Image (cartoon, rainbow, N blue to C red):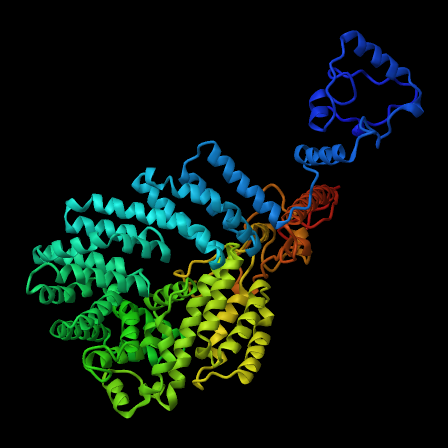
Amino acid sequence: MPKSASQEPDPPSGSAKKPAQKGGGLIPDVLRRALGGKARAPSRREESESSRARSVQPEESRHGPGGGAFLDEGEDEALYRSAMRTRLLGEDTEITAFHQARREAQLLGQMENKGEAPTRIVSQLNEQLSGAQGAEFKSLLSRELKPQLDRLAEQVDQATTENRRKIAALIARSAHLAGSESAATFEKLLTATANAEARHLEASAGAGAVVSASEFQTALRSAASQPYRAALIEKARGHIERMAREALQLPSGELHSVLVLLLGAAESLGRMECNAMAKTFLAGALGSGRPDAAGRLVKALGPALRDAPGGGNWVVRLLLNLVERGEQEAALALASTFAQAIRASRERCGPLLRAVQSAADKSELLEKSQKLDEQVGSLAALMPACALLLAARGSVPGGGNGPLVTEALVTVAGLDAVGATDNGQRMLRHTLIREEQGEPSFLGIVPVVSRPLGHPRLLQLLSENGLVVAHYQNGGGLFIQRVARQVFRALSGPVVARSQKGEGEEARRLLNSALCIHAPLYGMDLNGGRLAADIVERLRSNPQPDQAQRVLAELEEVAKKNPSPYRTGYVESLRALVTALAERDPHAAPKSAGLRRRAGAAPKMNAMEAERTHIVEVKKLEAQREAARAAARAPAAKAPGKAPARAPARAAATVPVKAPPKAPTAPPVEQAAPVVPKAPDNGVMSGVAPMNVREAERTHIVQTKNLEAQRAAQREAARAEGRSTSAAPGSTLPSGRARPLRG
């Protein structure tokens, strides 16, 4: 682009400026029109005359670097020119969150105007909300995009099933990234997607109950969003009722498949959605007209629960709805079936629960927990359902002291051992993440049941089931501390992973949610939990390994001023979380939680350290080879015990070309010590100094050149010494005999 008048330098004195090729002036017509000026179209004759006039004009009349063609422009023209220059040349360097959100919204608007698919637009929105943008930018962008997202909601019906589910997944993630303050922006699009999915389920109803249950499970799992799932269950009521009626008419094998699919679908549901699904399914099953519908359903739920224990919450909701509908016989049968399933899962673990609870150190704990992890999968999946039974113990058949509640209480008492396994850590992570999304979790029941577990009757029952009784005595303080340790160890993984991926706002929300909700687990009330969240958040945003002890000391002071109402819990339970946040590298990639470093494994090195180590090892190997070659030449240079006392470095250099006669064999005690080569210079072996790759390579080249020069000097000295030795009449031969005198 030609330079404008304000950008043209002054020509040197006595020289003439070349005429412009186009536009008839210092500024081309295109740029002149863009900057607010008027276009000119002079003839070629006028252009040449104006060029000659400019070439002979006096120096003081020429435009300086600050001059230009718009000396008499008005205020509006100047503002318009400044705006257009900013747009064309990009001179505006200060971009606020508002301007950035406006630009990103305009980009998505241009994609819509060009006819881009809704999937591509939603994917671009997800990329914009991901990363290190602040909460202000995300809120502004969501507000700017609300009209466009509302227009996209009208196009969802035209998308294919695969694209529609992809849109639902991306929009659910975008709503999570934007935060709860901007959730209303995405609600219309999520609801429209759920309505379209419900119509698709209605269209596929003729394929059979098994296919309908599989499609329903896929539709529920496609988006991790509470509004989407609630709208889908509400709009698919007729589909769920028809599926329940058809399932009870099927053989036992197909009924089992349908129930397993529904239990898997209910695993990801929240409290309200799970209850709505259970109520709708019971309405369809009991309204089928079969007198044995409830009994057949309860009988089939037992084997299905063993194959899909994650759907235990849905079974609890079915149980409570049966009690509410007055089906007492079916409710008692389901309670007995559920208690047997819980007992079988706990007995499958055997004495491994006690072994984990009584582990003496970390290595033993790791070994025992790995053995327990092979058997604890179903018990870990049933843990939230057991906590839900304890919360609703007044409505459960048999009451608070019934067999079902007792089994649930004993199962929750093993939470500290279950949480130490990989299955338990996975279950705790999912629970904490759903808490951040607004769902209540079962962890709130832990401080509540700690005191009842110390009752003598329950202590006897815990001892019979193989648990360590000492953990539940004196108010269950040790039990709560052990549970809290595993809970916050599970929290450290996703918080560190989000921080290292640049999702600082998401990491802050998850950390704040867990520390505020579960403050009683580490000995604080709600106010103390907020203060603790602020302290730990400062450490997360600025990790320093030497600050872990200081943060723990601050948390101890906060706990003294804001104690827990349950009088249980200790700040020491947060040590794993604080240590993980303090020692994380803010620029490192997240490490996989499933990979453990082998004991004694070599530490990982970056590229510079690897290159430096390679150079040092190569130099060490060269020195060792030189020493081996010098030691091999030493026996041939002189006979043992008769060689003159010379410097070791020169002895190897005076070896003649012809091999001397062999010397008589001497006893081993009289052999001379092997020739030790000259130690290399310190610079050759000093690769441990803190230097980068360039410095290491430069040092390697310099030392190699010096070593070559030293070897050349040694060869010249050996040749000169050989000539002087042959010329001397009385010199000593290599074998030790004197050279005879001539003449």
- Whether residue 626 can be seen here: no
Q: Front-most of 693 and 519?
A: 519
Q: Residue 484's spot in the image, x, y percent?
A: 42, 76
Q: Residue 393's spot in the image, x, y percent?
A: 26, 79
- In the image: residue 639, left or right of residue 525: right
Q: Indicate the quadrant where residue 415 lies.
A: bottom left
- Residue under the image location 38 percent in, 91 percent down: 474
Q: Is residue 735 above or below residue 281?
A: above
Q: Front-most of 466 and 254?
A: 254
Q: Farthest residue to the left: give it.
A: 291
Quarter of the C terminus within the rendering:
top right
- Residue under the image location 68 percent in, 58 percent down: 645
Q: Residue 119's spot in the image, x, y percent?
A: 40, 40
- In the image: residue 170, left or right of residue 268: right
Tally of numbered tags: 0
- In the image: residue 661, left or right of residue 296: right
Q: Is residue 304 above or below residue 35?
A: below
Quarter of the N terminus within the rendering:
top right
Q: Front-most of 490 and 438?
A: 438
Q: Is residue 178 above or below residue 560?
A: above
Q: Residue 502's spot in the image, x, y percent?
A: 53, 54
- Whether residue 142 can be seen here: yes
Q: Farthest residue to the bottom: give it.
A: 456
